[in-house]
Image: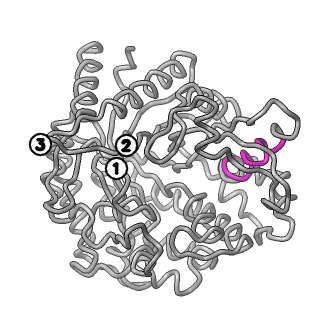
């Protein structure tokens, strides 16, 4: 399938998942440092202390990115490397990212920077974190410092990565840092996160004349388990809870009424002008998506919002193939998600900022053959191409992930990378999927040149 000549092919990572060097050059602890060092929070009690040691091996990794042939590399900045305390700036942290950006440009790779990918400084959490409205000012200060430092060489900026995850998984379910379990706190945190997003956009544009600014939301195509009124209503509630609660206010629709009703006892405190700030115009929407959610109705006693996803065994009983994460593989749902998002919100541009799959890769004779990942990526790219052909303005695709890495609460058990990392030696070994993606990109460029 031929993609437009200006289509951007890329690969993505996140700071805490790959950098390591958590105590180096003035970096202070993040909530993930704290959370991962509490026994029982992470599979095998893994931490990101070393991860892939990208902090010291970034030149080697950028060479692999260059050999891959992508036009862009999406990475995140570690807030704890930049602002050790409010009002302070750690120049050594800025210098690291400046070297990283310069190295990318030397290899003709466009940097795409995510300002926040979940590693909140612990000092900020100690004041309440995302549940404290002061976090908006802290994020604005951080944005100002980073964009002033890198804005002469970086045009593409993502404010937040997956605010649903770091607010609801972090403050409601407690399975992610900071490990709080309170719905009201999570809902308030989500509002502050969206406010921080909107507040940061004018700062970025003031510092960078050609800035392209967006936000990345994790979005699901939601499928009713059965064609019943109850399951259709449950699926719509899940869509509101996960997709519309964030996307609606970003695109000027305000918070969805059905979710305000559902959160009746946990509604956020919304100040005058907040919704206008959240709806500050963006240049693109980033979408992270891996699989659909198949939802059935549940008793209120079972779930406050009256929905529950099908279990992995139930999904397999429906004929779904699953990844190593027990996520169903369904490229048609991905295509439909793109149709639905464009129909509802009409974003100027869409970038698939994460898509990929974990499988139980094995290193044999110095190689990793991962045909399941190749099939997954190929089928999702094909589905994306069909959406583009139908008029959806998808302008780029970033595979997740460049490297096997620290997969948050799952530690190092799940491998998403197209490059295998031997965690004992930190050797990088390109997988079969790396070779496939490189050849695919080469063929795309050849066909449009």
Foreground residue among 435 and 58? 435
Q: Quadrant of the C terminus?
A: top left
What is the magenta range?
233-243
Looking at the rendered structure, the secondary structure element under dot 1 is loop
Residue, disc 1: 415
User: Is residue 310 located in the magenta-colored stretch of the structure?
Assistant: no
User: Residue 206 location, x and y as percent?
Assistant: 45, 58
User: Is residue 242 located in the magenta-colored stretch of the structure?
Assistant: yes
Q: Which mark is residue 359?
A: 2
Foreground residue among 232 and 359? 359
For marks 3 and 2 on the same chain, the one whose residue lies earlier in the sequence:
2
Residue at x 72% of width, y 70% of height:
183
For marks 1 and 2 on the same chain, the one whose residue lies earlier in the sequence:
2
User: Residue 310 location, x and y as percent?
Assistant: 67, 44
Q: Residues within 10 Å of mark 3 (few under 14, many from 20)?
A: few
For marks 3 and 1 on the same chain, the one whose residue lies earlier in the sequence:
3
Q: Tell me the chief SS of the magenta region.
A: helix
């Amino acid at each position: 399938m031929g993609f437009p000549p200006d289509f951007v092919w890329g690969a993505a990572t996140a700071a805490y998942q790959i950098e390591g060097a958590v105590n180096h050059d003035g970096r202070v602890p993040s909530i993930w440092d704290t959370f991962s060092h509490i026994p029982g929070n992470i599979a095998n009690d893994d931490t990101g202390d070393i991860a892939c040691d990208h902090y010291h091996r970034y030149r080697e990794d950028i060479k692999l990115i260059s050999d891959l042939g992508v036009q862009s590399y999406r990475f995140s900045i570690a807030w704890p490397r930049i602002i050790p305390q409010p009002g302070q700036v750690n120049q050594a942290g800025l210098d690291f990212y400046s070297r990283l950006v310069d190295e990318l440009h030397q290899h003709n790779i466009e940097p795409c920077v995510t300002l926040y990918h979940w590693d909140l400084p612990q000092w900020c959490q100690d004041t309440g974190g995302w549940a404290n409205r002061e976090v908006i000012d802290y994020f604005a200060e951080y944005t100002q410092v980073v964009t002033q430092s890198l804005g002469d060489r970086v045009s593409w900026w993502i404010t937040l990565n997956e605010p649903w995850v770091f607010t609801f998984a972090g403050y409601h379910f407690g399975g992610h840092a900071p490990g709080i379990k309170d719905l009201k706190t999570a809902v308030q945190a989500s509002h502050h996160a969206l406010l921080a997003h909107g507040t940061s956009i004018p700062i970025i544009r003031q510092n960078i004349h050609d800035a392209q600014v967006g936000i990345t939301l994790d979005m699901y195509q939601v499928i009713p388990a059965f064609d019943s009124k109850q399951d259709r209503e449950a699926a719509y509630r899940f869509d509101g809870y996960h997709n519309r609660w964030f996307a609606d206010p970003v695109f000027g629709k305000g918070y969805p009424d059905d979710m305000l009703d559902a959160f009746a006892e946990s509604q956020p405190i919304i100040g005058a002008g907040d919704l206008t700030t959240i709806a500050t115009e963006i240049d693109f929407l980033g979408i992270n998506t891996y699989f659909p959610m198949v939802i059935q109705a549940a008793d209120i006693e079972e779930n406050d919002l009256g929905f529950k996803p099908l279990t992995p065994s139930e999904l397999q009983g429906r004929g779904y193939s699953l990844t190593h994460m027990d996520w169903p593989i369904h490229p048609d749902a991905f295509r439909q998600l793109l149709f639905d998002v464009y129909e509802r919100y009409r974003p100027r541009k869409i970038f698939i900022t994460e898509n990929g799959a974990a499988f139980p890769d094995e290193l044999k004779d110095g190689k990793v053959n991962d045909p399941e990942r190749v099939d997954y990526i190929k089928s999702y790219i094909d589905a994306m191409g069909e959406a583009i052909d139908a008029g959806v303005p998808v302008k780029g695709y970033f595979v997740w992930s460049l490297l096997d890495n620290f997969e948050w609460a799952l530690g190092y058990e799940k491998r998403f990378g197209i490059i295998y990392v031997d965690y004992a030696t930190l050797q990088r070994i390109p997988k079969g999927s790396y070779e496939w993606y490189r050849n695919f990109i080469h063929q795309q460029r050849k066909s449009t040149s």
